[in-house]
Amino acid sequence: MIWAQDYDPMRAAWISTFLAALPVVALLGLIASGRVRIHVAASIGLGAALGVAVLGFGMPGPAAVAAAVFGAAYGLFPIGWIVLNVMFLYELTVRGGLFQVLRDNLSRVAPDPRVQLILIAYSFGAFIEGMAGFGTPVAITGAILIQLGFRPLQASVLALIANTAPVAFGSLGIPITTLAQVTGMDVMDLSRMTGRLLPLFSSIIPFWVVLAYGGWRALRGVWPAAAAAGLGFAVPQFLVSNFHGPWLVDNISGACSMASIVLLLRYWKPVPMAAGPELIVADRPRSAGIQPAGGAAPEPCLNGAGRVRIPASNEVAGRRRPLHAWVPWIILSSVIFVWGLPATKNLLEGRPQAGSGVRGWTRPTEPFLSAVGRWEVEVPWLHGRVKRSAPVAPAGGAAEKAVFVFNGLSATGTGILLAALITAAWMRLGWRSVLGTYAATIRKVRLSLVTIAAMLALGQVTKFSGVDATLGLALAGTGVAYPFFGTLLGWLGVALTGSDTASNVLFGSLQKISAERLGLSPILMGAANTTGGVMGKMIDAQSIVVASTATGFFGHEGEILRRVFWHSLALASLVGIWVTLLAYVPPFTNWVVGR
């Protein structure tokens, strides 16, 4: 029996909307209060979502429970699998004494912490986003910022803010290609439109990150670096998205952004900045420094830029050349890039290799890989049992699919694990040391994994119950102001689901239908959904947990959320204003694709 979603179960739109908002309000309120541990808050939010879905929206109980299990499984794999193995790689670099070498190396190449922030959190993070999303850039850049001496709150907040502009084209363009599949719109049109919305903000984000770090006083001394990074990313982002497509936008733009900063530093030096009260400083005990594997906690102390100086093993670090500190991250970037190629995924999942980029070449399916490379399990009581209704989905559409995919070999987390093992072998760490580090990493991230599982469970319950669509319809009914609020709809979707891709699946059809009813461009509003969504990435609970875990700040998620929320809302609102100008005001309307 198929259950059809009802978006106004109370037969009063404002009451239904209030009811739908309860799980999200409860979750974010508990996190922001700072009085409830985040894994407890996530569990309470999940309970509220189940209650609203079953008692308020009439979702069958077995389907609601199945949706929660489905979401929890997805939270552990592939997202939790990525977080675990990124942290494993980080712990290996700490054990190998490479973090001091990395700091010394960057102190020579980019000695100013503000430039390091732009280079790592923005430019390198964008490059990683192009290969793997799901919080991978936040985890990696947050871990590196900690190695460079940034305090945990700084590293968490700044990594989250920086991971915005590249998200729409992340993971080889998956958000855009998925949006095209869901809506039936042309993928190149969506790529072009998104590539005309985002570059303005890609240019702004490096400035915004430095402002969040140290205010205007900090920005005055490094604005040329912010401009080089922003334009070095924005210009290729526009060109590649408009003339090639969504697939390699972040990879090329991120590399160009890094190259722009390195080239600038050959001819320009930043103006030093003295420490001051504007800097973000974590309120933590002095004993809460980074814990090297197998050793006592070092005593952190602040340097002139408000960062933590973390002593390393000079005996180990002294034997490492400057390039050695970058080897783990070079290995990681190389492996993730290869792992993200369609040909690699097809091979590891035992699929025929047709369409892998070599014209006319087809590799036979490997029997072993076909058996273990990819499992697909239809979720009982959920798959094909729930159907979205108009206007969220076209009338007569198919029932929702609920298929858990386990691709253990081709998963990004597996590639990260391989990179970590290669790094361990390169550092000549014994297998006992490697296993001990992995066990310690599991202990360190165990509550984070529970939290992520609960967050994704909550997201799937709201999706399959229609709670998210009720919230979306409230924004969709804003008439002439829809370009602004439709952009915020994408922001809300990412904040709820933790994924720009999931937000596009969730609200893509609604954006298209609403735009056509209001005489707006569906291409513009589809791109607005994914562009507004990137600004919600910094406040979704999943990303916050990833950041807090990578920086050793777990348990302080409420403080992180309070720091990033207004940044997120302000940037999303600016995107909404930009979309409104493109929708109504000449000559901006000339930029709209297919108008």
Image: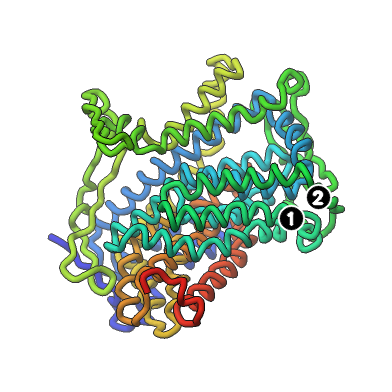
Disc 1 is placed on an element classified as: helix
Please give the label number shown on residue 283.
Answer: none
Q: Residue at x 73, y 23 (%)?
A: 317
Q: Residue at x 57, y 43 (%)?
A: 255
Q: Nearer the viewer, residue 342 or 479?
A: 342
Q: CA distance from mark 2 to mark 1?
A: 8 Å
Q: Which residue is mark 2?
A: 270
Q: Of label 2 and label 1, which has the lower sequence position?
A: 1
Q: Which residue is mark 1?
A: 224
Q: Is residue 305 above or below residue 387?
A: above
Total numbered labels placed on residues in the image:
2
Q: Is residue 401 above or below residue 577?
A: above
Q: Is residue 231 left or right of residue 460?
A: right
Q: Residue at x 56, y 56 (%)?
A: 235
Is label 2 in contact with label 1 (beta carbons under 8 Å)? yes
| Rendering coords of residue 326 (x, y %) | 64, 30
Amino acid type assigned to the residue bearing label 2 in the image: Pro
Q: Residue at x 47, y 63 (%)?
A: 531
| Rendering coords of residue 296 (x, y %) | 72, 28
| Rendering coords of residue 360 (x, y %) | 24, 34
Disc 2 is placed on an element classified as: loop
Q: Residues within 10 Å of mark 1 (few under 14, many from 20)?
A: some
| Rendering coords of residue 276 (x, y %) | 84, 57
Amino acid type assigned to the residue bearing label 1 in the image: Pro
Q: Is residue 173 above or below residue 590?
A: above
Coloring basis for residues: rainbow
Q: Is residue 294 visible?
A: no
